[in-house]
Image (cartoon, grey):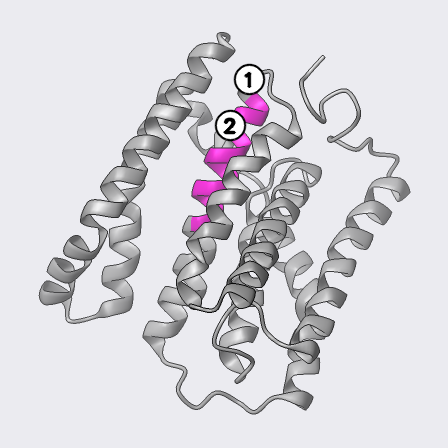
Amino acid sequence: MKNPTKALLIIIISFGMYFVLDDLYFKSIRKWLFELTNQLGISHMITYAISGIPLFLGGLLISRKSNFFKNFGLDKSVSRGFLFALVCTLPMYVGFSFVFDFNPEISLDTILISVVSAAFFEELFYRGFLFGLPFKKTILGFVPSVFFGALYFGMLHLYQSNELKELLGIFMITFLGGILFAWVYVEWKFNIWIPIFLHMLMNLSWELFAVSDNALGGIYSNVFRLVTIVLVIAFTVLYKKKNAIKFEINKKNILMKK
C-alpha cells in the first residue's frame, strides 16, 4: 500500500476490532470448542486463530495476497529462527537444570497454551502486525511503532500478580521483552520466526523447571535470562558486523522515517 495514512488507519481499526472481539468472546469461544474437542490446549490455539481474523484481514487489505506471509515475516527461514533461538536460550536450560527442580505438573495443555500459543500468536499479532506493519508501511520510526505493542504486551501479563511491586516488575520485564523481540525481528530481516522461537523456548524453560509463578522470577532465573538476552544482542551485532550488513534501525528511522 502506497498510502501510509491509509495503512495506519487499517492497522488501528483492525487491532481495535481484534481487541474488542478478543476481550468479549475469547473465553466463550474457547469454552464452546472445549466442549466439542475435550482438549483445552487445542481449543485455546483455535480460539487464538479465530480472534486474529481482523488482523489477518487487515494484513490482506494493506497489501496484495502474495505479500500476506511477507507482511507478517512468515516467509523467512524457520530453521534459522529455531537454531538462533536454541543457541541463545541454552544458558537458561543449563542454568535452570542446576538451580531448579523439574516441574512435575507440566502437561500437554501447559505446553500448548503457555508455550506454543503464547509464543506464536503473541509474536505474530504484536510484533508481526502491531509493530511490523506500522514500521514497514508508514512513516513511523522504531520508537513510535514499537511502543504500543510493547505496552500492550506488558499489560497482558499483569494478571500474574496482585502485589504492586511484582506488578511493576512483571510489566517492565515484559515491556522491555517486547522491545527486544521487535528489535531482533527487524535486524534479522523481518524474520518473525526469530522472536517466535525465542519466546517459545524461553517460556518452555520457565515451564519445564519450577522457576516462578510469574514472568518476574527471582535472582537466579533473571541471571540466566540476562545471559540469554546478552547472547541475542551480541550474536545479532556480530553477525551484522562480520557480514558487513547495515543495521536496519538507525538515526534515520528511530523516530520518524526521513
Residue 193, percent across and down?
A: 56, 49
At a point 48% along the width and 49% down the height, the residue shown is 153
Q: Secondary structure at mark 1?
A: loop
Reply above or below: 34 against 120.
below
Q: What label sits on residue 138 in the rendered view?
A: 1
Residue bearing mark 2: 133
Which of the marked residues, 2 or 1, is nearer the chain's N terminus? 2
Residue 68 visible: yes
- Near-viewer residue (165 or 148): 165
- Give the crowd class for mark 1: few <14, some 14-19, many >=20 residues within 10 Å: many
- Near-viewer residue (200 or 66): 200
- Give the crowd class for mark 2: few <14, some 14-19, many >=20 residues within 10 Å: many
Reply above or below: 202 against 84.
below
Q: Secondary structure at mark 2?
A: helix
Q: Quadrant of the C terminus?
A: top right
- Near-viewer residue (85 or 95): 95
Magenta includes 62? Answer: no
Residue 40, percent across and down?
A: 24, 68
- Give the magenta-colored segment's residue range: 122-136
